[in-house]
Amino acid sequence: MAEKLHIVGGGLAGSEAAWQAAESGLAVVLHEMRPNRATFAHQTDALAELVCSNSFRSDDWQNNAVGLLHEEMRRAGSLIMRAADAHKLPAGGALAVDRHGFSAAVTQALEAHPNVTIDRTEVSALPSSGLTIIATGPLTSEALGKSIADAAGQDHLAFFDAIAPIVHRDSINFDVAWFQSRYDKEGPGGGVADYINLPMDEAQYRAFVAALLAGDKTDFKEWEKSTPYFEACLPIEVMAERGVETLSFGPMKPVGLQDPRTTARPYAVVQLRQDNKLGTLWNMVGFQTKLKHGAQVEIFRTIPGLENAEFARLGGLHRNTFINSPRLLDNQLRLKSQPHLRFAGQITGVEGYVESAAIGLLAGRFAAAEAKGVTLSPPPVTTAFGALLGHITGGADEKTFQPMNVNFGLFPPIMEGKKKIKGKDRKQAMSLRAIEDLTAWLGEKVAAE
């Protein structure tokens, strides 16, 4: 195999694609413009840097679709999951990671791989030839974004994504705050008190919502004003605009929690999730925001327990980009009009760290197979891989296509005889079917190579 695979973008998708292709024996050039060209959201030059949350969400593979995707990726030899497992933090039933340890592990693995070359120069236009994967994600440079827009025609879309603040643990008032996981749910490490909880009574909650609505917010440029938000990652103040009780039924819901000082359930709760291995930094769960930095400090310090909070990072807002994949890509993630180009990660219209890495994994495998002259069949639609791939390459309506997290609604129904399995048994049955079908697909791939 004399041909090299070029991958543009060293985020989770690009890093995973590079690993999968390199492990198959293909020579890979991974192009990452940082640190020579910075973005307004990244803070380091590490590969697979986690810009927003440090959570990979639920790790329960038998009852949760993203947990199932975790398990499928592990079985497919994912570098991203290997690094996540090596640097996981306590987070109840979720998989949260030490963001610096995680990205350092991914960077070191790729730097050490004999089949990978890392090029730190900017790629400003789509290449006209050569096997290439575009995995530049939500922070695609302006020049490359224009080149993609030209290739996509009228199908170049965009939305806004937001970042939550991070608080120094030693600035939290534990006369007010307490440790507890919702419903005392035990996490993978056995912990039932993985979150810091900050309670509010009704008057405090209503005053907080009023402050969010009145707070000074980031202004949009004129050309950005028609860009929609992604519904699963709305800024906290945008949620508050939908009704005074919206937050108390969303990220500030108090169910499953009990304030040890009163032995009662608070009216609302702000939860903090551990953000680094040392436990010195804690992420404000669900508090993505477009408030200006001064307003964030003023308003968030009104939260009981955060009166003297020191912030390691304040929240922010960035513009995300994605293409109309159902119209533009085939089931090998190739651009139909220029099949030497593949796309991977968030730019394809998947949402979430794990989903982005999973599409990178598939793109890397598809490209490696093509370089060997082998056609690798897509994973079965009964798997999390296949359900996600199917959604972005034909399962979604191209006229209304929007970013999507993996969920069991993307999977075909599961039957018992002539009847659909329903209720609490449905998810577990779908998960068991997925693992069985994935095992067969991975075996077919090995045999094909």
Image (cartoon, grey):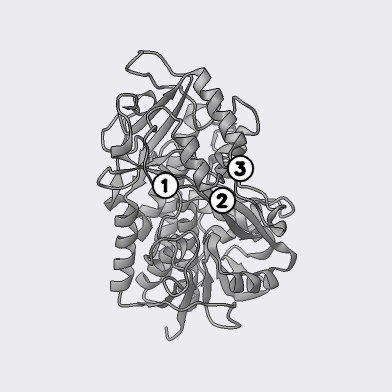
Q: Which residue is mark 3?
A: 231
Q: Which residue is mark 1?
A: 435
At numbered mark 1, what does the secondary structure look like: helix, strand or loop? helix
Q: Is residue 235 above or below residue 8?
A: above
At numbered mark 3, what does the secondary structure look like: helix, strand or loop? helix
Q: Between 366 and 6, which is closer to the camera in this rendering?
A: 6
Q: Classify mark 1: residues with Cα within 10 Å, few (<14), some (14-19) or many (20+).
A: many
Q: Is residue 160 above or below residue 135?
A: above
Pair 2/1: label in front: 2
Amino acid type at circle 2 is Asp
Q: Name the disc covering residue 42, or none.
A: none
Image quadrant where residue 46 sits: bottom left
Task: Report if the CB atoms under discs 3 and 1 are less than 8 Å apart.
Answer: no
Decide which of tag 3 and tag 2 comes sooner along the chain.
Answer: 2
Image quadrant where one finds the N terminus: bottom left
Distance from label 3 to label 2 (Cα)?
Answer: 9 Å
